[in-house]
Amino acid sequence: MTRHDLARGLLVVVAAVVPFARGLNNAFVWDDRIILGRRLGPAGCGGLADVWRQPYWGEGFGPRDTYRPLSLSLLYLQRRAFGETPALFRAVSLGLHAAVGLLVLAVLGRLAGARVGLASALLFAAHPVHAEAVAMAYGQLELVAALFTLAAVWLYVRAHAHPDGIRPWPLALAVVCAAAAACSKESALMLPALLMVVRAAWLVDGGDGDSGPAARARRFARGLGWDMLFVLAVVPYLMLRWRALGQLAPEPEATVTLGYTGAQRVKAVVIAVGEAVRLCVLPTGQGLYYGHLREALFGRPYAELVWAAAGVLLVVWLAKEIGRRAAVFGAGWFLLALFPVMNVIPTGLVVAERTLYVPSLGVCFLAAAWLDKLPRAMARALLAGLVLAGAAAGAAVVGNWRDEETLWRTTVAAHPRSPRAHLSLGQVLVDRWQASGAVPSPAELDDAAAAFETAYRLNPALTQALVGQGVVAARQGDPARAEQLLRQAVAKAPDDSGPRAALRALLDEVRARTNPGRNADGPDPADP
């Protein structure tokens, strides 16, 4: 390894760590609180054996739709070592992200040349779309899966690099990495297809002087037998998944498209692809929840269609600028890595930034390959500008997620049409008062009431928004309105025992304040 190699690696590490280090002291938010506080806590996990024989969410904590034992084991070990100290989890995430960036440098540098490899790695390391994967502890699932995926690609390339044929030991280690990636996150099941794209784009040129399409196709077909080893590598994961979940496919109730019409299912695919393209090319309005897209899902996803079409046109144009092979590789990597969350096969989400961690590499490569065709000085200036802009944007995003309140306030500001963002903001405010015992000011009560009212106006199916309005009304000293709202909430969800019990307690409290001498053996106050 030369000093130039060390310098390039150091640049990538700095680009990966500096933007997201701002989030080291952020509190646990969103799924971090559930995974680290409940799922991997003493009540939710009895040890590593439970991680490997239970669904991702555990028994009784959530849907039985996912199984990610290896990456969850890493989080479990960190929780045992660190307790619930957020900064230590964040430090591990930064280290993992830097390691992935170095693998990007090694893999693409070997395939496409040192300059393209370095530019790709720098753009990838500083890309702000990685904020969720790097700044959240649960994002380590993406990081670990990406680490093993790229390690498998690097070993696969080394196995094919020998002029006398396939080298067995790198190939065997690549198969092991493929199995580890699958056990880290289901999206890594696409690794065999990604490896075929790598081989088709970079590894089928022969030394016999025949580089025509027919000869390349024959050489590609001859290597399919070796590629099947990577299909077999996921069999252990599938067996473990069957044992833990009792099935391979997620339950229909765990998908977002349950009960959707055919048109709505198509819209889900368009929205997933279009928003993924937008976030990779122009990452603005980033968040942890994308409920504002429900209007496109139940309306007309014009913006997402435009972004998807723009992506296609961009690849067609790039094919002329950087060559068909590079364009096909970048676009193919993006689409194949994105496929598990496209909703072609229904999933549990429409858009989530963390799922773009591996797909975004295709976009970064396309940008790097285009920069490499420009004059050297111009390319360096543009690369520096893009990396600095991405780093600044990533630092700003993680700075917006210091705690639950800042997370949801910035989400509401960016997406005022997201009903669950408003609901979550109201719930955070109420939870803060209840946890601290503090008396909220009239302005704070009005703030929470407005959040719940907006959530309910945007989505009348959110019964929790009615409950929140009732809680705030009780705090505002309006027991009659509180009771009216809470009874309305009970009527809207008569079969839900959890909210019904909570509503009963709240109504008892309201009535106890207004009539302390009331007979406790009277009618059920939650009976609508």
Image (cartoon, rainbow, N blue to C red):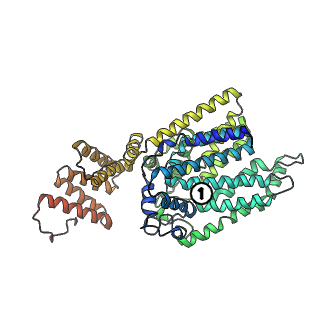
Q: Please name the residue shown 31% across and 49% down the image.
A: 429
Q: Can you say which quadrant of the picture contains the N terminus?
A: top right
Numbered marks: total:
1
Q: Position of residue 202 (x, y in %)?
A: 76, 47
- Furthest-right residue in this view: 208
In the depicted view, which residue is nearer to us: 144 or 483?
144
- Furthest-left residue in this view: 517
**From this viewpoint, is residue 400 visible?**
yes
Q: Can you say which quadrant of the picture contains the C terminus?
A: bottom left
Q: Please name the residue shown 61% across and 32% down the image.
A: 384
Q: Position of residue 381 (x, y in %)?
A: 63, 28
The reply, left or right, for residue 380 in relation to residue 270 is: right
SS of the residue under disc 1? helix
Q: Position of residue 306 (x, y in %)?
A: 55, 40
In the depicted view, which residue is nearer to us: 31 or 229?
31
In the depicted view, which residue is nearer to us: 305 or 165?
165
- The image quarter containing residue 13 is top right
Which amino acid type is marked by label 1?
A: Ser
Q: Please name the residue shown 44% across and 56% down the image.
A: 84
Q: Position of residue 37 (x, y in %)?
A: 42, 59
Q: Please name the residue shown 47% across and 49% down the image.
A: 87
The reply, left or right, for residue 335 in relation to residue 56 is: right
The reply, left or right, for residue 456 in relation to residue 278 is: left
Compared to residue 503, the image places residue 113 above or below, namely above
Q: Residues within 10 Å of mark 1 (few under 14, many from 20)?
A: many
Q: Which residue is mark 1?
A: 187
**From this viewpoint, is residue 316 visible?**
no
